[in-house]
Amino acid sequence: MKRIENATSRQVTFSKRRNGLLKKAFELSVLCDAEVALVVFSPRGRLYEFASATRSFFHVLA
């Protein structure tokens, strides 16, 4: 595995994989009744987060 050199391709890949990762986090929380928290920062510093609905995001991290 190596870094994607083309900036446009890298951004497209990040967006697709981010969405897939958020979906998997949701599925894990539902299927396994697990408390899940996920934090992702984009290369540009934008924050994306997921927390299972049963508790607040910060409670899961505490």
Image (tube, rainbow, N blue to C red):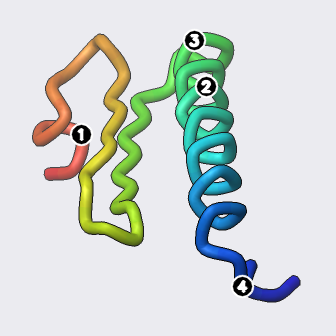
Judged by depth in the image, the label closer to the viewer, 2 or 3, is: 2
Using the numbered discs, state the Cα–Cα distance from disc 4 to disc 3 in whole angstroms. Answer: 36 Å
Q: Position of residue 48 (x, y in %)?
A: 32, 44
Pointers 1 and 3 in contact (CB under 8 A)? no
Q: Tell whether 60 sits left or right of 7.
A: left
Residue identified by numbered label 2: 23
Query: Residue 30: which numbered mark, if any?
Result: 3
In terms of sequence position, does the residue under pointer 1 or pointer 3 come before the other?
A: 3
User: Local crowd at mark 2 within 10 Å, few (<14), some, or many (≥20)?
Assistant: few
Q: Position of residue 18 (x, y in %)?
A: 56, 44
Residue identified by numbered label 1: 60
Q: Quadrant of residue 9?
A: bottom right
Q: Position of residue 17 (x, y in %)?
A: 67, 47
Residue identified by numbered label 4: 5
Using the numbered discs, state the Cα–Cα distance from disc 2 to disc 3 in whole angstroms. Answer: 11 Å
41 is higher (above) or lower (below) than 31: below
Judged by depth in the image, the label closer to the viewer, 4 or 3, is: 4
Using the numbered discs, state the Cα–Cα distance from disc 4 to disc 1 in whole angstroms. Answer: 36 Å
Q: Amino acid at mark 2?
A: Lys
In terms of sequence position, does the residue under pointer 4 or pointer 1 come before the other?
A: 4
Of all residues shown, which one is farthest toward the right? Answer: 1
Q: Amino acid at mark 1?
A: Val
Q: Tell whether 40 sits left or right of 29.
A: left
For the N terminus, which image quadrant?
bottom right
Pointers 4 and 3 in contact (CB under 8 A)? no
Q: Provide the secondary structure element on which disc 1 rests.
A: helix
Please name whichever residue, 13 or 50, is drawn nearer the observer in this view of the structure: 13
Q: Provide the secondary structure element on which disc 4 rests.
A: loop
In terms of sequence position, does the residue under pointer 2 or pointer 3 come before the other?
A: 2
Q: Quadrant of residue 41?
A: bottom left
Q: Provide the secondary structure element on which disc 3 rests.
A: helix
Q: Provide the secondary structure element on which disc 2 rests.
A: helix
